[in-house]
Amino acid sequence: MKKVFKMNKIMLIVGLVLIGLLCVACAGKAPGNDIVLKGGVMVWSVDVLSIVLATVLGGAIGLERELSGKAAGLRTNVLICLGAAVFTIISKRMVEGTDGSLVRIAAQIVTGVGFLGAGAVIQDRRGVHGLTTAATIWLVASIGMACGAGFYKLACISSF
């Protein structure tokens, strides 16, 4: 049963990579680099690419940790990376056409992730545990921010 579970996760990652490649291939197809969905809702293809890439990269790190039996596995890392990417995209869209500061939401992402990391660290009589988990949470959030900001090469290099 455990082997089937691991294979399903690997197939999930492969599927996400294929979706990401499809998004990259279709990024310039729609007029004005946007995708119009049913009901007139507009989604920027760059944002879709950022979200998919954040999911794939967070999933790759989470899958490695989950297969190693470590805390903060696949779902946790995907959610952290995806959340950081979405907040960064929201921040970019909110300051478009204004003189607002893009770095305010980014700074709050770092603060919030610091609290998540602090919750992963446990100290007992035998020593301190969870430092690698905390560092992973911090790194995955930064990869999500890089995806959301459009720094795809930096995000990919940082992931591996």
Image: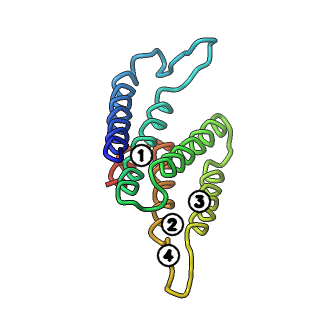
Residue 9 as seen in the image, left or right of residue 45: left
Residue plotted at (50% across, 59% down):
137
Identify residue type, mark 4: His
Q: Name the residue under label 3.
A: 113
Secondary structure category for the residue under label 1? helix
For the residue carrying disc 2, how many other residues have a C-alpha within 10 Å: few (<14), some (14-19), or many (20+)? many
Residue plotted at (43% across, 48% down):
58
**Sequence-first tag of 3 and 1:** 1
Q: Name the residue under label 1.
A: 59
**Sequence-first tag of 4 and 3:** 3
Q: Mark 2 points at which residue?
A: 134
Residue plotted at (45% across, 16% down):
30
**Sequence-first tag of 4 and 1:** 1
75 and 157: which is toward the camera: 75
Identify residue type, mark 3: Val
Cα–Cα gap, marks 4 and 2 = 10 Å
Q: Name the residue under label 4.
A: 129
